[in-house]
Image (spheres, rainbow, N blue to C red):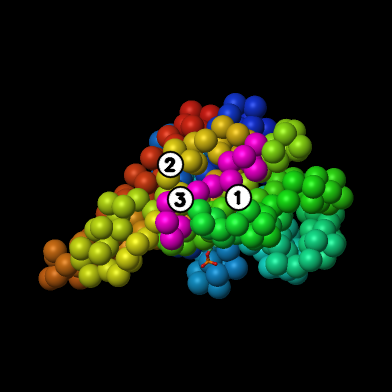
Amino acid sequence: MGLVTTKGMFKRAYDGGYAIGAFNVNNMEVIQGVVEALAMGNAPGILQISKGARQYAGMTYLRKLVEAALEEHKELELAVHLDHGPDFELCKACVDDPIFTSVMIDASALPLEENIRITKQVVDYAHAAGKVVEAELGRLGGIEEHVQVSEKEAFLTDPDEAEIFVERTKVDSLAVAIGTSHGAYKFKGEPVLALDLVEELTRRLKGFPLVMHGSSSVPQELVELCNKYGGQLPNARGVPEEMISKAVKMGICKVNIDTDIRLAITAKLREFFATQPSVFDYRKYLAPARDAVRNMVLHKLDVLGCKGKAVT
Ligand code: G3H
Ligand code: 13P
Ligand code: ZN
């Protein structure tokens, strides 16, 4: 199959009640780990590249690495997506880049009308080039149990606004704020997601793909391994896998994962350096770190239910 937009994979995911994993990549080992897992699991998938990834590795390297992955794994059904595009200019640059099939414009911090205007500008440009667009509405942030309903509603995605937003922008998918947040510290107390809101959004936007950012589960065994070998990640907490599965069954089609990749690598490296202090051949620790990424992603594919769903 090769490089595709997310259109077909989202439609099949929505109809089939499963979700597509979108994994942030910054270097060769992570790209290899993710695509190996997708190939082994015969799963469609998304590699996502942030502005920070572009700055870190440089787009020339990232483009060639993704091309290499596609050449090595001809069977992959893979989309390449700009994560959190901050403005029209960067989205345009990625639409113009043949390796990207999808871009996200994140104007969620702006007032609704501004978000609609910029998103529509990106959608018009991307659609003319045969590419797809994700936008965001609402503000990501953990819902604490003690927070008043009115305060929660201040940042969760408003279903009325979501209907207007999708209708006016003609965007292809929408990242919604349902109580998740980026990083390793998602909840101060018990994890809570506004699953009733996901249900409501799915009811109002029938057949439309919803995206969940901040979806890392922050596995406690990885946090413990980091902390055992000198890390300082006190009270790191993510979205429990059962909640991810529930949200997926309710209409979430794309699930974004970055933090769990970072944790898998960091835990492996910390353990390695502490237990094998005399080794300095970097291949000796980057190879197991890459394997840890692959194994973690393989597990995610089970949670999302997308194994065996690639069109090859
Ligand atoms: O949502 C943000 C992603 O985790 C990317 O993070 O901007 O540090 O590359 P980054
Ligand atoms: P995590 O920080 O939970 O991995 O979320 C990543 C993300 O949403 C990237 O856009
Ligand atoms: Zn995000």
The N terminus lies in quadrant: top right
Q: Is residue 229 left or right of residue 66?
A: left
Q: Is residue 307 left or right of residue 280?
A: right
Of residues 99 and 89, which is closer to you in this image?
Answer: 89
Is residue 75 something one can see in this rendering? no
Distance between the Cα atoms at labels 3 and 1?
12 Å
Is residue 116 something one can see in this rendering? yes
The C terminus lies in quadrant: top right
Please state which of the two labelled residues, at mark 3 or mark 2, is closer to the viewer.
3
Instruction: Write the residue at 73% across / 64% down.
Output: 107
Distance between the Cα atoms at labels 3 and 2?
11 Å
Residue type, numbered disc 3: Pro
Q: Which residue is mark 3?
A: 191
Q: Secondary structure at mark 3?
A: loop
Residue 220 location, x and y as percent? Answer: 31, 52
Instruction: Write the residue at 79% across / 51% down.
Output: 161
Q: Reading the chain from its start, which is encountered first: label 3 or label 1?
A: 1
Residue 198 located within the stretch drawn in magenta:
yes
Image position of 179 with respect to 204: above or below = below
The magenta span reads: 187-199
**Dot 1 crowding, Cα within 10 Å, few <14, some 14–19, many 20+:** many
Residue 107 located within the stretch drawn in magenta:
no
- State yes or no: discs 2 and 1 in contact (Cβ < 8 Å): no
Image position of 22 with respect to 17: above or below = below
Residue type, numbered disc 1: Ile
Rendered image: mark on residue 178: 1
Q: Which residue is mark 2?
A: 241
Q: Reading the chain from its start, which is encountered first: label 2 or label 1?
A: 1
| Majority secondary structure of magenta residues | loop
Residue type, numbered disc 2: Glu
